[in-house]
Image (tube, rainbow, N blue to C red):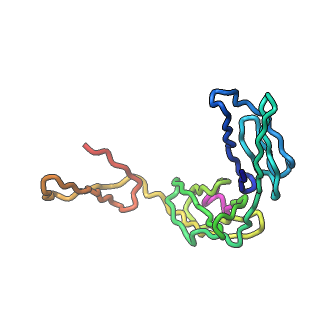
């Protein structure tokens, strides 16, 4: 069998023995450990571009091999949303889009002003205080993209809440009630009764 895998990825190697109740324990070897290696838990790990053959050997000397081709598709572009808006104290996640399809890269995230918004190593944005800043992502091959982050002041709890005074429904149908808060962007959740 043949396996194609990207650098840094892992895959469980399935062991089939006959008869089915025979000892499934095997010892793994690789023709090039710098390309691919199988751990004792049958987990294949890809380390570098190239081709290697991994072999499973049973305690009584039977063996089976698999050719592993490790590839890596470098991104040619990276993009982020042009702009996001958050209320201070809130959190959202930015997702970097890499092209072409299947491209992978280690990503480095940075906020131009962490007193306004912080960004985690996985692209999570935390709104710290009102203002505007820029979050930038950089790929391992030097491509960059930026997103404008606007943090608005938290308006606090709502001063009022309202619902429609009444409504008509046909039996068997339903509708969704949407409460209106004042101010409209108040930080609020509802408990229904």
Q: Residue at x 76, y 60 (%)?
A: 71
Q: Residue at x 77, y 45 (%)?
A: 65
Name the foreground residue: 148 vs 45. 45
**Residue 15 sits in quarter:** top right
* Range shown magenta: 110-119
Report x, y in % for residue 85: 51, 65
**Residue 4 sits in quarter:** bottom right
Q: How many marks?
A: 0
Q: Residue at x 79, y 28 (%)?
A: 59
Q: Residue at x 77, y 68 (%)?
A: 142
Outermost residue toward the front?
19
Name the foreground residue: 51 vs 174. 51
Image quarter (top left, top right, bottom left or bottom right) of the C terminus? top left
Report x, y in % for residue 133: 62, 67
Give the vertical position of 100 relative to 163 (above or below). below
Query: Can residue 110 be seen?
Result: yes
Q: Is residue 86 magenta?
A: no
Name the foreground residue: 163 vs 40. 40
Report x, y in % for residue 73: 73, 65
Query: Can residue 108 be seen?
Result: no
**Residue 150 sits in quarter:** bottom right
Query: In the visual, does 127 lie left or right of 120?
Result: left
Query: In the visual, does 35 lie left or right of 137?
Result: right
Name the foreground residue: 3 vs 12. 3
Give the vertical position of 193 relative to 156 (above or below). above
Give the vertical position of 112 relative to 46 (above or below). below
Report x, y in % for residue 100: 66, 70
């Amino acid at each position: 069998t043949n396996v194609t895998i990207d650098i840094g990825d892992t895959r469980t190697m399935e062991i089939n023995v006959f008869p089915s109740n025979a000892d499934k324990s095997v010892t793994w070897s690789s023709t090039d450990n710098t390309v691919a290696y199988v751990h004792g838990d049958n987990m294949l790990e890809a380390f570098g571009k190239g081709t290697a053959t991994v072999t499973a050997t049973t305690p009584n000397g039977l063996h089976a091999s698999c050719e592993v081709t490790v590839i890596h598709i470098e991104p040619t572009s990276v993009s982020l949303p042009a702009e996001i808006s958050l209320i201070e104290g809130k959190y959202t996640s930015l997702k970097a889009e890499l092209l072409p399809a299947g491209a992978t890269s280690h990503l480095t995230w940075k906020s131009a002003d962490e007193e306004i918004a912080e960004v985690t190593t996985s692209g999570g944005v935390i709104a710290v205080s009102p203002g505007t800043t820029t979050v930038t992502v950089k790929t391992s091959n030097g491509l960059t993209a930026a997103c404008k982050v606007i943090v608005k002041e938290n308006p606090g709890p709502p001063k009022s809440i309202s619902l429609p005074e009444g409504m008509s429904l046909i039996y068997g149908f339903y509708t969704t009630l949407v409460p209106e808060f004042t101010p409209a962007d108040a930080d609020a959740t509802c408990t229904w009764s």
